[in-house]
Image (cartoon, helix red, strand yellow):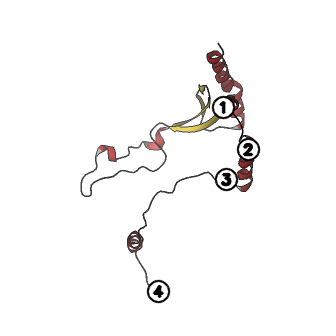
Amino acid sequence: MGKSVSVDTVRRALKNAGLVSFVKPKKPLINERNRMRRLQWARQHIDWTVNDWMNVIWSDETKVNRFGSDGKSYAWKVPGKPLKKHQVRETVKHGGGCIMVWSCISWYGPGYIVDVGKCMTKDIYLEVLQDDLMKSLAWYMVLYNG
């Protein structure tokens, strides 16, 4: 074709065609093997009762930032008007710090929250399970078994 087209022209054409831009949602990559394992697990537990689920503890770890999210942040404003304070994302150099925390939850409530440092390693995870999970289990026993 030999013609060059500006980025704005392409955006305008896409917009005129009824398309809108958005930030792609994230989802974990699940390979076929893990997909099959999850399906098998779900089928094995399909007939579980509430009493069965009362004996399950779920756990996870997450990063907590001192100053807001790592993700994108959006705001709406009136064109031509100056930005208001709530429309600006304040930042600090080097991110301001973060911690990695672990906790669990069961039928009986949340467990203890544990600061595991910067990243969860195999050894730290085993230590958390041996110490902090057991503390949460002991707490549940005190609360619900007198």
Across and down, in percent, residue 54 comes to: 66, 29
> Tag 4, which secondary structure?
loop
Q: Which residue is at a point 72% across and 26% down the rendered structure image?
A: 130
Q: What residue is disc 4 on? A: 2
As drawn, 78 above or below 8: above
Across and down, in percent, residue 72 comes to: 45, 51
Residue 50 - label: 1
Residue depth check, mark 3 versus mark 2: number of the one nearer the observer: 2
Residue 26 lies left or right of residue 80; in this view the side is right
Q: CA distance from mark 3 to mark 4?
A: 42 Å
Q: Amino acid at mark 2?
A: Trp
Crowding near pointer 4: few (<14 within 10 Å), some, many (20+)?
few
Q: Which residue is at a point 67% across and 32% down the rendered structure image?
A: 53
Q: CA distance from mark 2 to mark 4?
A: 56 Å
Across and down, in percent, residue 131 comes to: 69, 24
Across and down, in percent, residue 20 comes to: 42, 63
Which of pointers 2 and 4 lies earlier in the amino acid sequence? 4
Q: Nearer the viewer, residue 14 or 102?
A: 14
Residue contact between numbered discs 3 and 2, judged by CB atoms under 8 Å = no
Q: Amino acid at mark 1?
A: Val
> Tag 1, which secondary structure?
helix
Q: Nearer the viewer, residue 24 or 130?
A: 24
Residue lying at the far left of the rendered structure? 81
Q: CA distance from mark 1 to mark 4?
A: 67 Å
Q: What residue is disc 3 on? A: 30
